[in-house]
């Protein structure tokens, strides 16, 4: 009798259904990350700057960033940590926008005008309306009960005072201000002007009115240099 040849073992045959396994290709491991941390942090910053810490829920943050709660915790920590990271990013971005103006050589009045114009650009920005200053409007309210946020706020306020003081000291050395001028006292007036336009911009005071406040303050500060 002639024996019929047996078909090869199933294990040696390619799969009859579906796609055959391809060798040499890396296997997929898990789902790719569907968000960009930098973009997500920017979305959180916008929300915190608008609503503050207490009024912003995790559901709000999840909707704004497109990340679920576990992803938010994994990327940024809890809500407070995300708030602090957002505030630090705001400070970094605002500092970058201002530092060149503080360092560049120019007359005192021109420097002040450019500083306040840049501040107004920041404070009046927002898709749904002016948001003001994160430090003055939002973080300052959290500073009451949170030592870490309070330290960041104080650092921001004193840093601005010091930057303005350097400007006025430089102007004094160049003869734009008299010997009797007090650079630090003028710096506090300059900083206070920043704070008031930040609050008023949040209240949606028109830019023209804010610019009038700025002009009056600059006139007072620069006029100190005309006194005998």
Image (cartoon, rainbow, N blue to C red):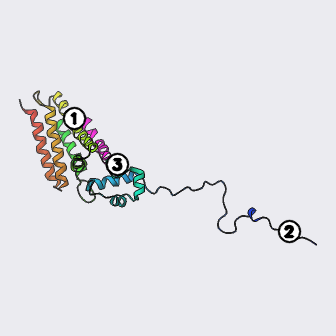
Principal SS element in the magenta part?
A: helix
* Residue 202 percent coordinates (x, y): 20, 54
Cα gap from disc 3 to disc 1, whole angstroms? 28 Å
Q: Quadrant of the C terminus?
A: top left
Left or right, 173 with respect to 59, comes to left
From what the image shows, is residue 4 above or below residue 189?
below
Q: What residue sits right under mark 1 in the picture? A: 162
Name the residue that disc number 2 marks.
Answer: 5
Residue drawn at point x = 37 percent, y = 57 percent: 65
Neighbours of disc 1 within 10 Å: few (<14), some (14-19), many (20+): some
Where does label 3 land, which residue? 81
Residue 29 location, quadrant: bottom right
Residue 173 placement: quadrant = top left
Q: CA distance from mark 3 to mark 2?
A: 71 Å
Q: Is residue 121 visible?
A: no
| Position of residue 172 measured from the top left corner of the image (x, y, whole percent) | 16, 29
Q: Earlier in the sequence, mark 3 or mark 1?
A: 3
Residue in the picture at 30% in, 47% down: 87
Circle nearer the N terminus (1, 2): 2
* Quadrant of the frame with the N terminus: bottom right
Please say if the residues under marks 3 and 2 sit with CB atoms less than 8 Å apart. no
Q: Identify the secondary structure beneath mark 1.
A: helix
């Amino acid at each position: 009798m002639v024996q019929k040849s047996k078909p090869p073992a199933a294990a040696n045959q390619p799969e009859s259904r579906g796609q055959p396994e391809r060798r040499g290709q890396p296997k997929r491991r898990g789902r790719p990350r569907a968000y960009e941390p930098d973009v997500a942090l920017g979305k959180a910053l916008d929300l915190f700057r608008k609503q503050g810490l207490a009024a912003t829920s995790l559901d709000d943050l999840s909707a704004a960033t497109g990340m679920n709660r576990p992803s938010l915790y994994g990327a940024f920590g809890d809500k407070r940590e995300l708030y602090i990271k957002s505030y630090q990013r705001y400070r970094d971005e605002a500092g970058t926008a201002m530092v060149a103006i503080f360092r560049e050589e120019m007359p005192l009045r021109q420097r002040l005008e450019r500083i306040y114009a840049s501040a107004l650009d920041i404070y009046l920005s927002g898709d749904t309306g002016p948001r003001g200053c994160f430090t003055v409007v939002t973080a300052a309210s959290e500073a009451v009960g949170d030592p870490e946020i309070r330290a960041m706020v104080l650092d921001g306020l004193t840093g601005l005072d010091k930057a303005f003081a350097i400007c006025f000291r430089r102007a004094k050395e160049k003869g734009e201000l008299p010997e009797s001028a007090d650079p630090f006292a003028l710096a506090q007036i300059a900083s206070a002007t920043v704070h008031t336009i930040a609050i008023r911009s949040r209240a949606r005071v028109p830019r023209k009115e804010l610019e009038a406040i700025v002009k009056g303050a600059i006139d007072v500060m620069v006029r100190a240099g005309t006194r005998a």
